[in-house]
Structures are given as structure tokens and as C-alpha cells.
Image (tube, rainbow, N blue to C red):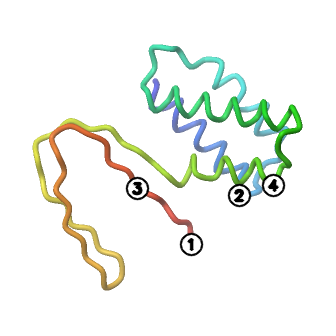
Amino acid sequence: MAARLEFQIRDWLARYLSGDVALQAFHDAVAPLIWSVSERASASLCALAHEVEWRLAEYSNGDWTERELRSLLHPLVTDIQVTYEAAPAAVVTSTGSLTRLQTVRPVGTLSATVFAS
């Protein structure tokens, strides 16, 4: 349930940031999702919900223009952190001619930045 809720919030964020939906439609869609987040939810879901809620409240208070709001929300769909627990492993990633070998620790957080093309 928590993973689905986090996906729904990020999906609405992406739709708003891409211009598919207006700010009011985004707000109307995510407000009930944010309100349904329990304090017992995962740390990443709580952080996401609180960040969106705070940014929308700051925008409503006149602290940001809509352009600034979009800029502040953008990292929430491009910078992803995943907490994992697994046996150590080597991960090879390739981008064009660049290949990178990374050792994944048994417990920790893996961060990635996603770039849209």
C-alpha cells in the first residue's frame, strides 16, 4: 500500500511538472493522498508527503511563484533514494561509453538522479 501511495504521489508530481495537469488539479489530486499517509509509513513516503505538503503551503502563502514551486518540486521526481537490505553485490552500469562498477552494501541507501530526455 505504501509503495503504491508513493508511486501515485510521484506520478501526479510528474504529470504536473510535465504540464499535463494544472496546479489546481495537481493539488486536488495529491491532497487526499498526502492526508492518508500514516506516521507509521516508510521514511521515504513520509518525507515525500511532507515535502510536497510544505511546498504547496509555502506557495499558497505567497512564498514562491509557480515557476519557483515547479523548480522546488522537480527533485522529488528526479532524485530517487531506495533503501535496501541484501547480500553484497557488484553492480555494473553503462551510459554511452562510460561503464561504472559499484559495490552494493548489504544495508544502506542507493541514490540516483533520473534525467528525462
**The C terminus - image quarter:** bottom right
Circle 1 sits on which residue?
117
Disc 4 marks which amino acid? Arg
Disc 1 marks which amino acid? Ser
Identify which residue is drawn at 26% across, 39% down: 108
| Alpha carbon separation for disc pair 2 and 3 | 20 Å
Circle 4 sits on which residue?
67
Identify which residue is drawn at 83% across, 49% down: 66
Vertical placement of 13 versus 93: above or below? above
Q: Which mark is residue 18?
A: 2
Q: Residues within 10 Å of mark 3 (few under 14, many from 20)?
A: few
Circle 3 sits on which residue?
112
| Alpha carbon separation for disc pair 4 and 2 | 12 Å
Q: Give the number of the mark in front: 2 or 3.
A: 3
Q: Position of residue 37 (x, y in %)?
A: 56, 19
| Alpha carbon separation for disc pair 3 and 4 | 24 Å
Whichever of labels 3 and 4 marks the residue nearer the N terminus, that label is 4
Outermost residue on the right side: it is: 62
Tell me: 81 left or right of 51: left
Q: Position of residue 58 (x, y in %)?
A: 79, 34
Q: Give the number of the mark in front: 4 or 2.
A: 4
